[in-house]
Image (cartoon, grey):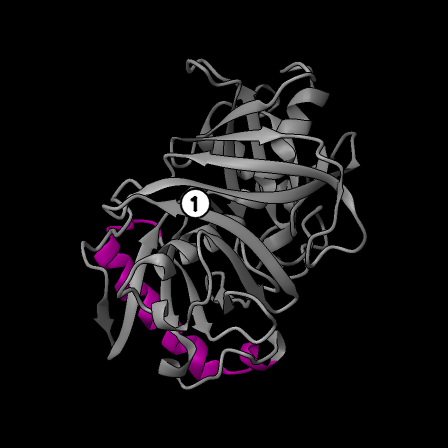
Amino acid sequence: MLIRGGTSKGAYFLAADLPSDPAERDDLLIRTMGSGDPRQIDGIGGATPLTSKVAVVSPSSEPNVDVDYLFLQLGVEEATVSDRQNCGNLLAGVGPFAVARGLVPTDRPVRIRMVNSDSVATARFPVGEVAISGVPGTAPGVVLDFDDTEGPNGLLPTGNLVDVIDGVPVTCVDNGMPVVVARAADLGVTGYESVSQLADDLALRDRVQRLRMQAAALMGLRDTTSVPKTTLVAPPVDGGSICTRTFIPLRLHTSIGVLGAVSVATALLMDGGVGHELFSGSSRVDVEHPTGHLQVEVELDPAGRVRRSGVVRTARTLFDGTVFPR
């Protein structure tokens, strides 16, 4: 099933319909998406990381959980598959997919275990017609509440609130997505540039790559294919809480990922974190991005641990049928 979840689009499979061997599964998905070709012309990928995604869903054996959701990020130019991150946008489509495939009943929220991080989200839907930035029109709303999304190496994987890498102060945070937060001004840009302007800045891209690779080592990340993301922050300009530009990991995101936004908001809420002085908001954080706004909620307890986080997304089924891999 092809579903648009949030500002991403992906292919949703039942785990039982894919090879059980991870190497065989990955090979099949690479051929399905057409990865290894920047156009993905011989597959169903959309030639961007945001449309080269896969959700693998199965009934869960965990107590108080309905389904397991494994997210796989397929490369575009490179024939790669990574399970080292979550995707909160595709998560929005997991509940509707599980209902459509008869895995769960239709009359209650769906508890979803995000296999990548071994954390749980609760999806409530539909909640009326909702408009979200980056997607035309309206679609059925999905409310996502996250449990225990702190990363396996902790909320601050380096052990520090601030690290200095290549002379740039950063906050390395993982509240569902490993992210390096840096002030745009510290990298010589305003943070208000268009996606195309920043994409053409090869010197900036190289600097971001050096920054994130050093940060990855400090964060204890082994697979750096798709994480950490890097988000540059600047004072808000459109009534939001913060303005952002995000690299995923080196392409400019046309908006910002759900769990990436949750992680950025978490860093900004910490007194002394990079960008905290630029931040204007409370536990409800309005994140400005190149195509609009994303509102997330993050609550920290007095000790600085995550009490809860959540977001409203939309999902729409685009196609249900048979795909023919190369």
What residue do we see at 41% from left, 64% from top?
A: 230
Q: Pick whichever, 199 or 147, lies toward us.
A: 147
Magenta part of the chain: 197-223
Q: Which residue is mark 1?
A: 85
Q: Quadrant of the C terminus?
A: top right
Q: Is residue 125 above or below residue 184?
A: above
Q: In which quarter of the view is residue 231 placed?
A: bottom left
Q: Is residue 222 above or below residue 207?
A: above
What residue do we see at 19% from left, 59% from top?
A: 160
Image x and y of residue 54, in percent: 59, 39
Q: Inspect the magenta stretch and tell me whether residue 220 lies in it.
A: yes
Q: In which quarter of the view is residue 227 placed?
A: bottom left
Image x and y of residue 121, in percent: 49, 31
Q: Amino acid at mark 1?
A: Gln
Q: Pick whichever, 56 or 172, lies toward us.
A: 172
Image x and y of residue 112, in percent: 51, 26
Q: Is residue 117 above or below residue 250?
A: above
